[in-house]
Image (cartoon, rainbow, N blue to C red):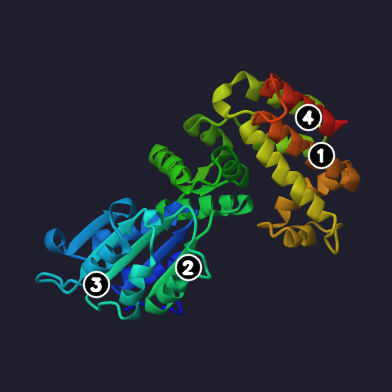
Amino acid sequence: MAEKANATTYDSIMRELKSGNYSSVYLLMGDESYYIDKISDFIAEHALKPEERDFNQQIVFGADVTAAQVADMARSYPVMAERQVIIVKEAQNIKNWDQLEKYLEKPAKTTVLVVCYKNGTIDGRKKILARFKSAGVVFECKKKREYELPGFIEGYLRLHTKATIENKAAQMIADHIGSDLNRLTSELDKLILSLKDGEMRITPEMVEQRIGINKDFNPFELRSAIAAKDIVKANLIVKYFDSNPKTGGAFVLVPILFSYFQNLMIAYYAPNRQSDAEVAKWLDLRGSWAAKEYMLGMKNYSGVKVMKIIEKLRETDAKCKGLDNPNTPDGELLKELIFFIMH
């Protein structure tokens, strides 16, 4: 059985599983479905031999079963196998969890019960969560934060290929795709398949050609242009996004700019805001190089201006979603926003 004390991260859970150590119960919950799927899929593929699965593996959905039915399935015995596997997908659709509490007090040693609870978590005040913790492994899968995405991209590529990736290329992918890890890894898989013999370093040009991200007109470059107060370049990028609806326009740019100025506001409170390394540490960035745009931003924007920009970003976001905006196009809202930021 997996040691509960150590099985608190995706990597530690996977280490135990790959070693053949299975807990009687897994509760996988949270807003990031990628890790929930990876863990449950691994258990489905490896906990039983192929010839054992027909009689000893059941995959059900929360909308189709009750907690009592899950408990009854888990209490049954395996057929000519060491264990049986019960996987409950979309478990957030189960309405009454109390009926599973009694089973969790003494889970069957011959059952591996995997509960996949997506798009949220079980209320920590409920007794059922404490029961899950005492019975086995509870793992909360949280969304990756924006600053964590380039590191995730580098790690994923390192795991699946010998190639490395330039910082700008990783940032381009992160800014373009965002924190949906299923979509992100799908694009990375395509990039890996496109690598030719001898290509050991992924560059912005390769990302542009093979993923379809323009290296000169993307959110990463807009953020850089705004930090440097490069009015011409910023407006060119906004014009490009407005002319190409598939890029996502305001719905892609506004959240990224909001995140930048929110962090810029925090940077003003760094104990030593003259030091790249100290600002990077204060903002929990991956290295002093990542603080460059914040150092530049603090030179070009006052704290008061940043506060006003954040308010303007909130206003623009609301208008892009149709609030207090009868007919102004998103492109015009973006141009107005950039003018406000730069002047």
- The answer to which of 324 and 279 lies nearer the viewer is 324
Give the amino acid at mark 4: Ile
Give the amino acid at mark 3: Thr
Toward which corner of the image does residue 286 lie, by quadrant?
bottom right
Q: Residue at left 44%, top 66%?
A: 11
Percent position of residue 153, x then y: 52, 50
Give the amino acid at mark 1: Ile
Q: Residue at left 53%, top 58%?
A: 142
Of pointers 3 and 4, the one earlier in the residue sequence: 3
The answer to whether 121 is drawn above or below residue 300 in the figure is below
Is the residue under label 4 in contact with that under label 3 (CB below 8 Å)? Answer: no
Q: CA distance from mark 2 to mark 4?
A: 41 Å
Indicate the secondary structure of the residue bearing disc 1: helix
Toward which corner of the image does residue 204 lie, by quadrant?
top right
Percent position of residue 197, x then y: 39, 41
Q: Which residue is mark 2?
A: 9
Q: CA distance from mark 4 to mark 1?
A: 10 Å
Q: Which residue is mark 1?
A: 309
Q: Which mark is residue 111?
A: 3
Q: Which residue is mark 4?
A: 338
Report whether 37 appears left or right of 151. left
The answer to whether 238 is drawn above or below residue 228 in the figure is above
Q: Is the residue marked by circle 1 packed among few (<14), some (14-19), or many (20+) residues within 10 Å?
A: many
